[in-house]
């Protein structure tokens, strides 16, 4: 029996097989609603220049240059040697769910049950899966602006409408409560928060989150709190909206191993989710990736339960690198840069440079060999800014700042 249950091709509805205007089979229109990350596009351009023999300073990708801690890799190797190379439970191995629940309980100060923790191939799937599980056409989703571009991309893919919540430098790149109130409506299905924030490095104050929680609880909205950078902060307290009374029941608290443990390539994230969302999110995992490889989960357990000195050392070095970059940027004509409180991104305002930020980013790559991102790739609130990752060595950062300074100094005024 063939693909169409034994029917001849001629009996199949022709509209299902109709080619597009080029005469080729068509692509679903919904794909056009999917955005992308400018970081990967710029990385590809930079790598092509490297293949041509150019020396490129990479300040575009959000990836720590530190090695994954040795004991983490050893745990994965031991797991492979023990034969743990087959399927694992879709929701995650019990041992990792317990380790993640324990970590979240310690770090956030609220009791998280292992049964509420799910594991996926990185933190990013939880963004898409949460949106798909909750949102339909006609719904609205409040997203940070500037913010991680995948938020709005996932919302549009689901047919819902992203509503920008502006993050303003005057508020430490936090949001204004009045503007949050204006963004909320009877159509709001989800509010996405991200602190520490990508791309600004801003950290939302606990008092603001508490007031925001009270406003959100007056609606029927869920919350996705992206806290992937929670362990990378420089003295400022990082708070979670999930800790506000009543919010854990409506908040997906998202975290993972990529940033704090320098495990970007391992692809392992986890989330504490409300009980009502455990089954829908698990179904989406089953329908997409099946599970995270068990040896990767063993590595994640070692990271969460093992020594944390590598995290502390990384944060100390990132603070030093942050100060180098911020000082260098603020010394440039037409540039001002707030000091980020968390993550590992500087978000300088380059509106005083006699060149649009997008053109400046292009020229920095093409002429100076420095890969950075235009802030507009993170939403309208990022216009006039650049995003610079300082998760690179001091020598790399010093060279990048020197080249940026030389190009800006040479612009006609």
Image: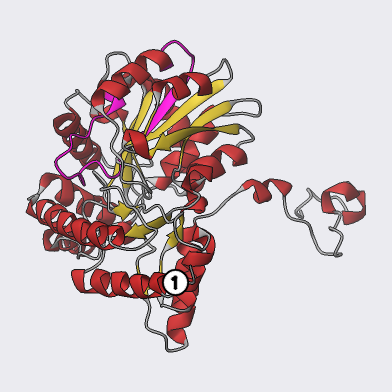
Q: Which residue occupies the foreground of this view, 412 or 40? A: 412
**Residue 38 on the magenta span:** no
- The residue pinned by badge 1 equals 364
Query: Residue 160's quadrant in the figure?
Result: top right
Q: Quick one: which residue is furthest to the bottom in this view? A: 53
Q: Secondary structure at mark 1?
A: helix
User: Does residue 86 sit above or below 55 in this rendering?
Assistant: above
Q: Which residues are magenta?
A: 216-242
Q: Is residue 360 visible?
A: yes
Q: Tell me what residue is drawn at x 54 percent, y 22 percent.
A: 188
Residue 137 lies, in percent from the top left, at 65, 29
345 left or right of 232 in image: right
Residue placed at 39% from the left, 20% from the top?
Answer: 250
Q: Is residue 264 above or below residue 276?
A: below
Residue 75, image x, y percentages: 16, 58
Image x and y of residue 71, in percent = 11, 59
**In front here: 365 or 124?**
365
Helix, strand or loop for the magenta stretch, by majority: loop
- From the viewer's perspective, tell me whether residue 258 is left or right of residue 105: right
Front one among 317 and 385:
385
Residue at the front extreme of this rendering: 413
Write down the quadrant of residue 97 in the picture: top left
């Amino acid at each position: 029996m063939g693909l169409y249950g034994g029917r001849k091709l001629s009996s199949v509805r022709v509209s299902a097989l109709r080619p597009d205007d080029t005469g080729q089979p068509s692509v679903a229109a919904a794909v056009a609603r999917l955005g992308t990350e400018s970081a990967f596009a710029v990385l590809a351009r930079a790598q092509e220049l490297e293949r041509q023999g150019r020396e490129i300073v990479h300040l575009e990708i959000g990836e720590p240059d530190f090695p994954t801690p040795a004991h983490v890799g050893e745990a994965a190797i031991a797991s492979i040697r023990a034969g743990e190379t087959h399927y694992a439970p879709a929701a995650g191995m019990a041992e990792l769910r317990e380790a993640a629940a324990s970590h979240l309980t310690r770090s956030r100060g609220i009791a998280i049950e292992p049964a509420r923790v799910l594991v996926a191939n990185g933190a990013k799937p939880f963004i898409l899966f949460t949106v798909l599980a909750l949102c339909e056409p006609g719904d609205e989703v409040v997203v940070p602006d500037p913010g991680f571009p995948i938020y709005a991309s996932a919302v549009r893919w689901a047919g819902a409408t992203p509503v920008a919540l502006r993050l303003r430098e005057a508020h430490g790149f936090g949001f204004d409560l009045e503007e949050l109130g204006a963004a909320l409506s009877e159509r709001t299905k989800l509010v996405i928060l991200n602190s520490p924030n990508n791309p600004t490095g801003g950290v939302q104050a606990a008092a603001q989150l508490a007031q925001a929680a009270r406003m959100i609880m007056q609606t029927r909205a869920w919350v996705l709190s992206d806290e992937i950078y929670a362990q990378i902060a420089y003295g400022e307290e990082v708070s979670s909206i999930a800790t506000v009374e009543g919010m854990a029941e409506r908040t997906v608290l998202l975290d993972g191993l990529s940033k704090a443990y320098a495990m970007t390539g391992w692809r392992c994230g986890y989330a504490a989710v409300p009980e009502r969302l455990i089954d829908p999110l698990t179904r989406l995992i089953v329908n997409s990736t099946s599970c995270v490889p068990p040896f990767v989960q063993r590595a994640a357990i070692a990271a969460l339960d093992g020594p944390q000195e590598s995290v502390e050392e990384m944060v100390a070095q990132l603070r030093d690198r942050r100060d180098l970059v911020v000082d260098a940027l603020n010394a440039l004509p037409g540039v001002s840069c707030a000091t980020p409180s968390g993550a590992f991104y500087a978000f300088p305002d380059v509106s005083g440079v006699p060149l649009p930020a997008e053109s400046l980013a292009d020229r920095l790559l093409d002429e100076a060999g420095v890969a950075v991102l235009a802030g507009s790739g993170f939403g309208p609130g990022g216009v006039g800014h650049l995003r610079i990752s300082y998760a690179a060595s001091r020598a790399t950062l010093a060279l990048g700042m020197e080249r940026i300074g030389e190009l800006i100094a040479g612009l006609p005024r």
